[in-house]
Image (cartoon, rainbow, N blue to C red):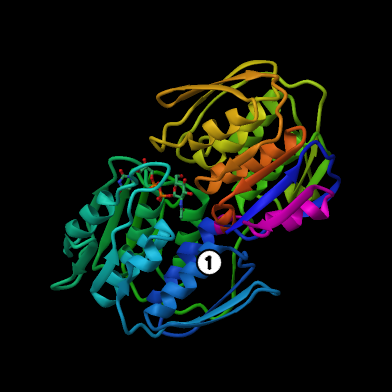
């Protein structure tokens, strides 16, 4: 198992290029189950979650080619086995995105129930209830979701009790194949949902309201895209590099940035005092460090609110600000696993339920740490870069799930980061 050794307080300089968005690429790759002919993608990030998704599709009978140098992937959809097995879904909860396409296209699916994970229970009951309402028979047996469609799926009005990103995405796939109109109320407005809706629209499906809380989909004939589909830049990787620039007090140019989708994150960092300038018509962000930062209060919310996937990184930066900062985590019930690790570096963070209080400025000192989930790992990297001395972060497979060679990108800018086998 790999670990990262980081010697902190080394100034970085230069530019970094943001890779393709993980949370857009995953639903796009699963969408190939809906098509009849081969589909190509470009700007696919080099991530474990992509590898897992492609292996899962292969397990179902699809063939694929992935050129990691060019970022191109081609998938030949030839589904023989409509099962997403536990072996794959346990590695990546987004495996639930196999459910919608299999039910939509083949009228049957056997998809492993994702387990809980470090950040909370993460149930999928909304997905299952919505499929039932559209005419699918759905049961859970021996850890698997078994879905079948006795007659054609029928459009329905589906109301999500809470905003769910992958839930909305699964219903977009199903709505595209159902008879009549499907209306999703309290739909997720995340850019990744809008991207999937746009893809389906380009393939001939009528969709209204993507990016709002009500999405209407008219089932129709889906045409296979003929040109390669490009994955846009990753907004959370962009935000993580802002966090890294502040942690290392370095001026960094972030290229291919997803700044337009990060309004609340930019606002939070600017409120702390960090200077972030847009360049190249907004496609690059220049982060300029300052001598003093102010405490802020932030709470996570569904898009366009402050993303839960940036909570851990900002929490590490709050250690640099004057006074008491507050963070409220509203999306996941147990997303403060990184706090205990950050405290090992000397961070003054206390939690009370979903509220975290951070006292600053607090100088951090390097220590061994353990990564617990994807974004927590990023926050440990941020803290290690900020800390005096050496830190070793173990279990960084979590980081490799969602960050495209972060260690190499850091090294290019001058960071003292070494990947070591443990
Ligand atoms: C997606 C993102 C993840 C991000 C999260 C919240 C992908 C692949 N992953 O995860 O990076 O952190 O959105 O922005 O896009 N819920 C239920 N029942 C359900 C579904 C959800 O109770 O059936 C709850 C969850 O436990 C959670 C909340 O709703 O508290 C939001 O979860 P959801 O948006 O579904 O997260 P994911 O789609 O898994």
Which quadrant holds residue 34?
Answer: bottom left
Q: Is residue 257 above or below residue 41?
A: above
Q: Assess disc 1: are there few (<14), some (14-19) or many (≥20) residues with their C-alpha within 10 Å of its C-alpha.
A: many
Query: Within the image, what quadrant is residue 266 found in?
Result: top right
| Residue assigned mark 1 | 50
Residue furthest front as drawn: 422
Q: Is 142 rendered above or below residue 269?
A: below
Magenta stretch containing residue 214, yes or no?
A: no
Q: Quadrant of the C terminus?
A: bottom right
Instruction: Tell me if 81 is positioned left or right of 16 in this view.
Output: left
Relative horizontal placement of residue 338, taking residue 201 as reference (left or right):
right
Does the magenta run of residues contain 420? yes
- Tell me the quarter of the image containing the N terminus: bottom right
Residue 108: image x %, image y %?
Answer: 23, 73
Q: Is residue 242 visible?
A: no
Foreground of the two, 415 or 295 = 415
Residue range highlighted in magenta: 401-422
Residue at left offset 71%, top offset 48%: 5
Q: Secondary structure at mark 1?
A: helix
Where is residue 166? Give x, y as percent. 39, 54
| Residue in the picture at 62% in, 64% down | 45
């Amino acid at each position: 198992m790999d670990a990262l050794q980081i010697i902190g307080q080394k100034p970085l300089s230069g530019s970094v290029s943001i890779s393709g968005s993980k949370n857009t690429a995953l639903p796009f790759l699963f969408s190939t189950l809906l098509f009849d002919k081969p589909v190509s993608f470009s700007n696919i990030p080099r991530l474990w979650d992509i590898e897992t998704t492609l292996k899962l599709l292969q397990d179902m009978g699809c063939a694929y080619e992935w050129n990691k140098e060019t970022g191109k992937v081609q998938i030949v959809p030839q589904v023989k086995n409509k099962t997403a097995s536990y072996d794959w879904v346990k590695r990546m909860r987004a495996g639930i995105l196999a459910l919608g396409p299999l039910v939509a296209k083949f009228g049957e699916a056997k998809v492993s129930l994702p387990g809980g994970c470090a950040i909370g229970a993460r149930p999928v009951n909304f997905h299952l209830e919505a499929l039932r309402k559209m005419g699918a028979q759905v049961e859970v047996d021996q850890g698997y979701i078994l879905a079948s469609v006795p007659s054609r799926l029928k459009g329905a009005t589906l109301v999500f009790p809470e905003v769910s990103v992958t839930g909305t995405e699964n219903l977009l796939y199903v709505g595209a194949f159902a008879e009549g109109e499907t209306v999703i109320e309290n739909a997720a407005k995340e850019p990744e949902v809008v991207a999937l809706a746009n893809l389906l629209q380009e393939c001939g499906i009528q969709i209204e309201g993507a990016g709002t809380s009500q999405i209407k989909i008219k089932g129709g004939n889906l045409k296979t895209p003929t040109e390669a589909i490009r994955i846009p830049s990753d907004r959370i990787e962009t935000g993580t590099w802002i966090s890294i620039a502040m942690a290392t007090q370095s001026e960094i140019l972030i290229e291919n940035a997803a700044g337009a989708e990060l309004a609340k994150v930019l606002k939070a960092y600017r409120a702390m005092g960090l200077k972030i300038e847009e360049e190249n018509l907004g496609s690059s962000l220049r982060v300029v460090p300052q001598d003093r930062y102010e405490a802020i209060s932030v709470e996570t919310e569904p898009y366009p609110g402050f993303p839960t996937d940036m909570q851990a990184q900002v929490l590490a930066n709050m250690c640099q600000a004057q006074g008491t900062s507050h963070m409220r985590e509203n999306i996941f019930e147990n997303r403060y696993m990184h706090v205990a690790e950050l405290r090992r570096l000397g961070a003054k963070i206390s939690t009370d339920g979903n509220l975290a209080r951070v006292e600053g400025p607090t100088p951090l000192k390097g220590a061994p740490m353990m990564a617990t989930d994807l974004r927590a790992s990023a926050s440990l990297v941020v803290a290690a870069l900020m800390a005096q001395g050496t830190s070793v972060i173990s279990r960084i497979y979590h980081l490799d799930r969602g960050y495209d060679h972060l260690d190499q990108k850091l090294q290019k800018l001058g960071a003292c980061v070494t990947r070591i086998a443990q």
